Image (tube, rainbow, N blue to C red):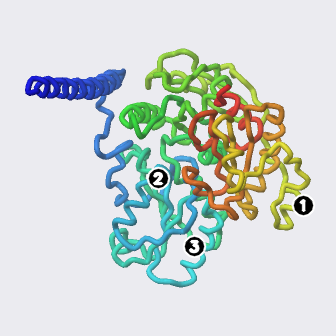
Amino acid sequence: ESARSVMRGFRLLTLALLALLAVNQLAWAQDEDDMDMDGAEGGDEDYDGDEGYGGGGDGYDDEDYSGDGEDGEGGGGSAEIKELTTVEEFDAFLNDEDASVVGFFAEEGSALDDFKATAQGMQWDYRFAYTTSAELLSAHKYKSAAVVYKPPRFASEKAEKLKARYPGSDFKNSDALKIFLREKSLPLVGQLTWKTKERYSSCGLPLVKVFFDVDYELNPKGSNYYVNRVRKVAEEYVGKLSFAIAAIKDYSYESSDYGLTLEEGKKQVGVGIEDGDKRYGMGEAEFSPASLKAFVEQFLKGELTPTKVVEPYSPPPPGEDDEAGDEGGGDVDESGVTVATPDNFEQVVEPSKNVMLEFYAPWCGHCKMLKPEYAKLGKEFEGDESVVIAKMDADEHTPPAGWEVQGYPTIFFQPKGGKPTPYEGARNAKEMAEYVRAHKVV
C-alpha cells in the first residue's frame, strides 16, 4: 500500500511539472513574438512604455491648442452627459479610445444649460461631460469653457497638441461647435471606425489608411509599433493628408478596392489612399516609414493610377414620415428585415446563422437615415438562408446580455457559430453587404 501511495505521488508530481513546462513554453513563445516585433525595421525606440499610445502621458496640462491644427472630427457617442466631480472621474473619462469633450462651469446657470442642450443633440456623435467642481476648475484653470481632448491612446505629446478650447462663448451654436470638433479632435494618426470614417470624410483631405491586425487587448505593443511609424510620416503632411490605422478584421472587405489581399490573423500590412471616389494601393511593397513616404509622395505628385474608382455614396433624402417625427424612412420595403424582440430573440439570432443585427430607437435621426439602406441590405440577402438581417427597438426593449448598446444605431454582426462583433463600416447597403459576404461563415 505504501508503494502504491508513493507511485501516485510521483505521477501527480510529474503531471504538475508537465503543466508548469507548458505554461513556460507559452510565455517563451509570447516573448519571442514580442522580440520579433521589436526587431522589425525602425527598432523599438519608438515605444513609449507606460505612457501608452504615442506617449500621451500627463500632457493634458499643457497650454490650450489655439493655432491651426490637424483635421478631423471627434469621438464616439456616449449615452448620457456625464457629470464629473472628482479628479479620478475626470481622468477616467478622458482615458478612452475616443476623443472627449468636457464643459467647465463655475456654477449652474444658462451657460451650462445651453452646453447640456447642445451636447444632448450630439450625444451619439461625441463623448460629452461637464463639471462644476471647484477642484477641477482650479486644476485646469477654466471657469466657462468647452474643451476637447484627443484620445490618449493615439495622441502624441511629442507631435501634436492634446487638447483645444472652444473659442466661442455661445454654447447654443451647435453648428459652430461641430465645426470646431471637426478641426481639433482627431489625432495625427487615429483609428478608422464607422464613426471616425464619416468624420475623416468630412474633413476634405485624402485619407491614408494603414491596414493591419490591430489588437489593443492581446498585442498593444505591436499596434503601437505601427502607429508610431505612421506618425513619423504623418507629421510631414499636416494639412495635406489625413492618416488612420484600420483593423483588418473590420475592413478586409475594402482591401480589394486598393488591390490588396488581407486576412485577419496574419502579420500583414497594407496601405491605401482614399481620395474622393478614387482608391490607390501601395501594392506588395514592404511597409516602413520610408516606403510609406515614397508612396505618399507619388500620390501627391499625381504619379499613381487608381486601383479603383467607386461611385460616391449620397445619403437618401428623408421621407415625409421623417419630417412628421415618426419612425421615418417613407415607404420603405422592409420585408427582408426580421424584427427581433425579447420573445423571439433566440430564434432570430440563432448560432447556425450569420446575423446582422441593428439596435435602433424610433426617434433617432441617424436611425431614420439608415432605415432605407438597411432595408436594401435585407432585400440583398432575402434569398440567402445562411444570413439573417434583423433589427431590434432598443428604446422599447432592453438589449440582451452580451450586446452592449452605447448609442443609436448600434450594429452587430454575429457569424455562424461565433460571437457578436460591432460593425464599424459605412452605413450604406453596398458596404454593409460587402462586409457580410466577407465575414459570413458558410
Q: CA distance from mark 2 to mark 1?
A: 39 Å
In the rendered view, does 48 fall on the left or right side of 272?
left
Amino acid type for the residue under numbered disc 1: Glu
Comparing marks 2 and 1, which lies closer to the viewer? Answer: 1
Label 1 packing within 10 angstroms: few (<14), some (14-19), many (20+) = few
Label 2 packing within 10 angstroms: few (<14), some (14-19), many (20+) = many
In the rendered view, does 441 fall on the left or right side of 158?
right
- Residue 150 - label: 2
Label 3 packing within 10 angstroms: few (<14), some (14-19), many (20+) = many
The disc, 1 or 3, on the residue closer to the chain's N-terminal end is 3
Q: Residue at x 48, y 75 (%)?
A: 144
In the rendered view, does 165 fall on the left or right side of 329?
left
Tell which of 40 and 423 is nearer to you. 423
Q: Which residue is mark 3?
A: 115
Which element is circle 2 on?
Answer: loop
Where does residue 123 sit, x and y in percent of width and height? 60, 63
Tell which of 44 and 162 is nearer to you. 44
Q: CA distance from mark 2 to mark 3?
A: 19 Å
Amino acid type for the residue under numbered disc 2: Lys
Which element is circle 1 on?
Answer: helix
Tell which of 349 and 77 is nearer to you. 349
Compared with 184, 249 (above or below) is: above
Of all residues shown, which one is farthest toward the front?
A: 1
Tell which of 292 and 337 is nearer to you. 337
Compared with 297, 156 (above or below) is: below
Q: Which residue is mark 1?
A: 320
Where does residue 315 sit, x and y in percent of width and height? 79, 47
- Check if mark 1's residue and mark 3's residue have beta carbons within 8 Å: no
Q: Residue at x 48, y 66 (%)?
A: 102
